[in-house]
Amino acid sequence: MSLNRRNFVKGAAVASFLPSFNILHADTVTIGPKDDTINVAIIGFGAEGKVLSESLVRIPGVRVRAVCDIWKFHQQQARAFFKSYGMPVTVFEDYRDMLDKEDKNIDAVVVATPDWMHCEHTCYCLRKGKHVYCEKEMSNRLEQAAEMCRVAKETGKLLQIGHQRRSNPRYRHCFTKVIPEMLGRVTTAYAQWNRTLAPFFTVKRPPKQSLLTKYGYENPEQFLNWRWFYKYGGGSMVDLGSHQIDLFIWAWGVPPSSVTAIGGKDAFNPPRMAYDRVMCIYEFDMPDGTKNEAYYQVISSNSRGGFYEQFMGVNASLTIAEISARGNTVQRELREGGLTDADWQKFVDKGYILPSKGDLIKKEVTKDIAVDTRISLQASGNDLAVSMNKPAHMPHLENFFAACRHGEALNCPAELAYESAVAVLKANESADSRKMYKFKPEEFKVPPRA
Ligand SMILES: NC(=O)c1ccc[n+]([C@@H]2O[C@H](COP(=O)([O-])OP(=O)(O)OC[C@H]3O[C@@H](n4cnc5c(N)ncnc54)[C@H](O)[C@@H]3O)[C@@H](O)[C@H]2O)c1
């Protein structure tokens, strides 16, 4: 049955009487509310708050009760959006006001405000006894990201960070099966997020300056384009790189040992405060003494190739992207001593990849041009056998609510996200100094409060 607004509301009414999550976990400790409905508040109903809400209204047994946003226009949008799904919400300008007045009605909070407010909003909610799903980047200040981890630990509440690929079934298939079993040793990874030149956001009627000043925004331009100002965000490296650098750490199971970055700020005229482009190389010291490298670039002046990640092993490589049309392939290395046709077929039989749709590129190469030893023969790729047919953030939110209800393990708990926050924020520092930044292993552990 397709999910439209009307049958969702009907479905949700039925679903609230049913155990809606993985019954395998039914015997574990229940830490959610007794009737199994999780009551949710949202702080920040901007672009991402709206995207998350599209998933929230589709998760059975989740009921959004209140929304906080300092901008009246977004409060109105929230009210109208949830009303259209049969979920009337109370709206607030101030998060403390919301948490105080709705305290008894709220079990968990979704934080989707600009990065610089994550620590304040998250810690307040945790201390109020709420579980929190907070968007990435944890914070644009490492000390604040560390504080979020400490408060989660002290309060014993759950804190999931919004690196949603960690719960995406396509990514989980790749990181648990394809990368470890099909690729062979992966010495190299590459990822990029390229976007075309885009002017600053503007709106006809921004919030009044008195409201912006009250909440720490210097002017409407900075309020609407906070990513580009270090007070509120960390530029494109922190905004977009945070998703993809997290994947290097996931693939290799260790945080990086160094980063060397360069960046540019003059793609826009006048130049923006934060880097509009960064290119960097991370080194990873593996437990067996070998070293691996990941090259990363984020560009705001040209969208060529878009966004995707690649993991390159001696036996095969994986190209994956959150949008499968941009990356969904495993490609065999055609080399002496590499995987044979029979080896490859086994992965098809095991349900890791789909049968190949095309001929080997090898044939084209040998037909059209003289093959010499400098050209590596390339196989056409096989599509991944696992697909994802939900909104991108839905499985990550589902994982969070399953953790709230049944103690299922979070896929991106705060301490894990802290590692990638360290890796990402230090790339900006390396670009500033134009020097390699060498990490100490203890930097990836949350320090005690100073
Ligand atoms: N996981 C993802 O794929 C993804 C994608 C986009 C954004 N994000 C993250 O989501 C967060 C929000 O980004 P966005 O693109 O929605 O930004 P946005 O500017 O569109 O929205 C931010 C919202 O927060 C509100 N706000 C600002 N300060 C506030 C305060 N003190 N109290 C209450 N409300 C406040 C604003 O009025 C606005 O509605 C960021 O952390 C961003 O990195 C994640």
Image: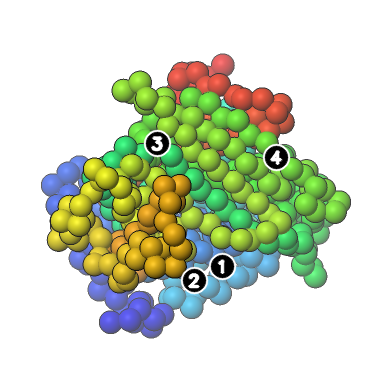
Which one is earlier in the sequence, the residue at label 4 or at label 3? Answer: 3
The quadrant of the picture showing ligand 1 is bottom right
Q: Is residue 245 something that shows in the picture?
A: yes
Q: CA distance from mark 3 to mark 1?
A: 46 Å
Q: Determine crowd level at label 4: few under 14, some 14-19, many 20+ residues with C-alpha closer than 10 A.
A: many
Asked if labels 1 and 2 touch by Cβ distance under 8 angstroms, the answer is yes
Q: Element at badge 4?
A: strand
Q: Amino acid at mark 2?
A: Phe
Q: Which circle's residue, 1 or 4, is located before the other in the chain?
A: 1
Q: CA distance from mark 3 to mark 2?
A: 47 Å
Q: Viewer-proximal residue, 71 or 436?
A: 436
Q: What's the CA distance linking mark 4 and mark 3?
A: 25 Å
**Front of the two marks 4 and 3:** 3
Crowd band around label 1 with a 10 angstrom C-alpha radius: few (<14), some (14–19), many (20+): many
Identified by mark 1, the residue type is Ala
Question: Residue at label 2?
Answer: 82
Neighbor class of circle 3 (other Cα within 10 Å; few <14, some 14-19, many 20+) is some
Between the residue at mark 1 and the residue at mark 4, the CA separation in whole angstroms equals 38 Å
The amino acid pointed to by label 4 is Gly
Q: Secondary structure at mark 3?
A: strand
Percent coordinates x, y for residue 120 in the rendering: 58, 38
On residue 78, the disc is 1
Q: Residue at x 28, y 82 (%)?
A: 1
Label 2, label 4: how far apart the Cα atoms are: 42 Å
Q: Which residue is mark 4?
A: 263
Kindly indicate whether the residue at mark 4 contacts the one at mark 1 (C-beta within 8 angstroms).
no
Give me the disc on residue 187.
3
